[in-house]
Every structure is written in C-alpha cells, then in structure tokens.
Amino acid sequence: MNLASPLLFSLKPHYANLVFEGVKRAELRRRITPFMENRDVYVYVSSPDQCLRGGFRVGHVWKGSPDEIWNQVSDLASIDKRDFDAYYAGRTIAYALQIMDVWENEYPTDLSTLKKRFPRFVVPQSWRYLRPEEYRSFRRMKRKIKQTQPAPALETTSRSNG
C-alpha cells in the first residue's frame, strides 16, 4: 500500500483560477484521506473547462469544527462566509489543506484527450487516487509556476465533543 499516492481533485473553474493565481492558499474539504501532508494533488478543472490544469503540494492540514476552520483559514481560502457555511452545512468536522508549491501544466489537457490516453479515466466528484500510469504521465506535464507563502501553523488543542 502506497500511503502517499498522488490525488486528483476536481475544482470549479473559479477556485482553480484562484489557486493558479496564488490567491487561494487553503483548499476546503469535507473529507480527506489519511496522510495528506506533503502529498501531490493534481487539479482537474470541472465544467465548462474540463481539463487537467496543474496541481500543488499539500502543506499543513487543519481539522476542526467548521467554526474553528473558518477562524483558522478564512483569509487563505478565498471564499465568503455564506458559501463556506453552505459547503459545511450539517458537518461537525471540517478540513482545510495548505496549498504549497503550485505548478501549472504548460498546456492543460482536456477531458477527451485524458479519456483517449487513459480508457479508465474517471473525473472525481471530489477526489480520487491517481492510477500509476496516470501519475507517470501527469508528472511529465508538470511545470512549476508559483510558490506560495506558508500558511500559519494550526495550534493543536484537544477538545472533547462530549
């Protein structure tokens, strides 16, 4: 079992643009896989773009209640409070991933090309593990373009949910 297998995230075009512009420095998630820190994440941009555009490395991982995560990353996540609350509605645990070492492919790869190259290619609803053949191909496309500043570290506190 490879604990650090690269992931494929699906992002809406608006949020993907903010990542590649270096504005969005934390990615919000309702669920994650174990061992997220220092993992490569490739970014598939959803409709209407429908392309593999680049990626980033995960730095720090924040975990807490939605209110705690809002207090930690609201200035890093490029989202307003209303949309944040809607995203985490009904959730007791929220996650945020520090976006570091952003890269953008010189030429984004559109969905039809991905499906021709990889017959089993599936666009994730949220995220999925990359297959080894996908990873080998995707990392050859990688061209580093931006470095982000590290986000502040999360103070770890133990809380009981009683």
Image (cartoon, grey):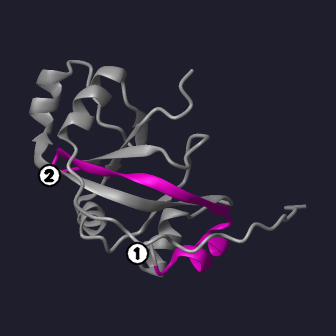
Say which mark, if any, is on residue 68: none
Is 135 situated above or below 96? Answer: above
Residue 126 visible, this angle: no
Q: Which residue is mark 1?
A: 79
Three-letter code for the amino acid on which mark 2 is drawn: Asp
Q: Position of residue 8 (x, y in %)?
A: 36, 40
Three-letter code for the amino acid on which mark 1 is drawn: Ile
CA–CA distance in space, label 1 to label 2 = 20 Å
Magenta segment range?
46-75
- Which residue is rendered at x = 51% and y = 48% of the image? 38
Label whose residue precedes the other's in the sequence (1 or 2)? 2
Q: Which residue is mark 2?
A: 49
Query: Is 58 inside the magenta-drawn segment?
Result: yes
Between 109 and 136, the residue placed more toward the observer is: 136
- Which residue is rendered at x = 56% and y = 48% of the image? 31
Q: Position of residue 155 (x, y in %)?
A: 72, 71
Q: Quadrant of residue 140?
A: top left
Q: Secondary structure at mark 1?
A: loop
Q: Residues within 10 Å of mark 2 (few under 14, many from 20)?
A: some
Quadrant location of the N terminus? top right
Residue 44 visible, this angle: yes
Quadrant location of the C terminus? bottom right
